[in-house]
Image (cartoon, rainbow, N blue to C red):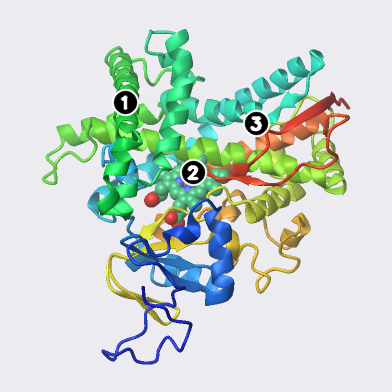
Amino acid sequence: TRTTKGGSPSSGDDDGRRRLPPSPPGLPLLGHLPLLLGSLPHRRLQAMAASHGSVVLLRMGRVPTVVASSAAAAQEVMKVRDLAYASRPRLRMAERLLYGRDMAFAPYGERWRQARRVSVLHLLSHRRVLFFRRAREQEAAAMVARVSRTRAAAAAVNLNAALISYSSGIISRAALGVADVRTYGLDGGGGAAGENLTKLFDDFEALLGTVTVGELLPWLAWVDTLTGLHAKAARTSAEMDAFLERVIADHRQRRRAGRHREGGDGDDHRDFVDVLLDVNEAEHDGDDARGVLFDDDSIKGIILNMFSAATDTTYTTLVWAMAELINHPDEIRRLQDEIRAAVAGGGGVTEDHLEQLRYHRRVIKETLRLHAPVPLLLPRETTEDTELLGYRVPARTRVLVNAWAIARDPAAWERADEFLPERFADDDMKATDYLLGHHFRFVPFGAGRRGCPGVGFAAPAMELALASLLYHFDWELPAGGPSKVEMDELKGLSVRLKTTLHLTAKPWSP
Ligand code: HEM
């Protein structure tokens, strides 16, 4: 592996072109893989950036990978040269589990553009997000009731479980029109097969976050068979397909009966599956020379994208927020004062209150700064030969943006490692503000063409849940245990708090 250390990026290479980014020493064949094994990659890559600079070239086995670790580098990837960085690499597990026809992992091109357009206009538009308000408020009320029940039984509340159920309830209602995926349990109800569905979704998420050995080191591809990875992927993908077939068949049946728009209030009551089936039928009816882009596999791929993208990120952020607040008693008190003053007169938090809760937004933003749930965003791939901060980046290079390191860069943030929500006090906080790049120092949702289209969906879901938990209860760590939450991270598709957050809840009323 070539070893360089900085140097002037624009000074000539042997062939008179710009230099490749610097690379730490690596091993033959394995490249830099051993440097990342067994570690939290965003932390290891942060350390690498500190010694080699904010643009580093690594070889993950046979895959050249550039890592961008400063706001300036992120801005170049996601804004200045967005088009050149707008593709995604082919990831074997994603391709297999998502039919090669989803949106989030699709290469840049017509199919991705169409899927993105339909998602932004019809699934995640401001209008549709407003329409799902009832779903969010019902799920928040159910979560508060669940906490009250646990408390009544004198037990500590498992906040992870409460928040997973809240987040998956919202996306399940929005995507499938039911409060619980287990409604589609393969036995026709919420019985044992319904329970298996929860495991199926867990297995699915774990596999989606798995990189096969074979795609990085083709000569070791047999290891994936030996470890049973391929067999597990085949099994999981077949079970998930049976579930989705059932969802689609059920929706088609309701459509034939004309029941999918019902609500009696003149509103559009279609869920994501209904909307995608409408697009699919319109394409069949039309005379589209490009062929049908939204076949059943595309619908399944996009629905699975929405589940994966919405559940873990939302719940993970909320757990981190509660953990930070427990460790910062002044901040939790200030936030509760704000929420309780806004909801004067009792009755609980509704979405009408959220707009006034400015400190609350700062707390969520500060949580996302310190704990981006997807710290390296989703990998990108260059579509053509391009540049990054003056270095040469060839076509088909994999590109990671270390949003986590950028958000803790002492050159960009004062007291970068501390939880200080007031640092966002100058922002004019609207929901979409979460996406604004703060000059690309704050990019938990990515940005540009491939930036997260779900931020408008995520924002009210996170805000309502946190405000509801803090309005109705006073929270503490259980007596006799540690006095602080240990903030260690657990590696996964999204990076979570390592410990399960158990807290005691004392009801509050005005
Ligand atoms: C706290 C919540 C969330 C966070 C932190 C988050 C973060 C991200 C990130 C980092 C990316 C990759 C961006 C890039 O490559 O520049 C992404 C993409 C995506 N997100 Fe989110 N997300 C969240 C919630 C949601 C929700 C609620 C949905 C949908 C209901 C969603 C749907 C998607 C989709 C479909 C993509 C792929 C976009 C594409 O490739 O064109 N996300 N998200």
Residue denoted by label 3 = 160
Direction from residue 305 to residue 353 in the image, left or right: right
Image position, residue 104 (x, y; %): 37, 46
Mark 1 residue type: Arg
**What percent of the width, then of the height, locates residue 215?**
30, 51
Q: Check the picture and name the quadrant holding the C terminus.
A: top right
Q: Which numbered dot is residue 235?
A: 1
In terms of image quadrants, where is residue 4?
bottom left
Q: Earlier in the sequence, mark 2 or mark 1?
A: 1
Q: CA distance from mark 1 to mark 3?
A: 28 Å
What residue does disc 2 label? 493
Above or below, 7 against 507 in this view is below
At 74% from the left edge and 25% from the top edge, which residue is drawn? 157
Q: Secondary structure at mark 2?
A: loop
Quarter of the image holding residue 391? bottom left
Where 86 falls versus 142 (above or below)?
below
Could you tell me how many numbered marks the image carries? Answer: 3
Q: Badge 3: few (under 14), some or many (20 or more) residues near its Cα, within 10 Å?
A: some
Q: From the viewer's perspective, is the residue at label 1 or at label 3 nearer?
A: 1
Residue 333 drawn at (x, y percent): 86, 42
Query: Looking at the picture, which amino acid does disc 3 mark?
Result: Asn
Residue at 14% over, 46% down:
290
**Residue at point 88%, 29% (across, down):** 479
Q: Quadrant of the N terminus?
A: bottom left
Q: Secondary structure at mark 3?
A: helix
User: How far, Cα to Cα, is label 2 from label 1?
Assistant: 20 Å
Q: Earlier in the sequence, mark 1 or mark 3?
A: 3
Residue at position x 24%, y 30% in the image:
296
Asked if residue 53 can be seen in this view, the reply is no
Circle 2 residues within 10 Å: few <14, some 14–19, many ≥20: some
Q: Position of residue 172 (x, y in %)?
A: 48, 26
Left or right, residue 418 beside residue 119:
right
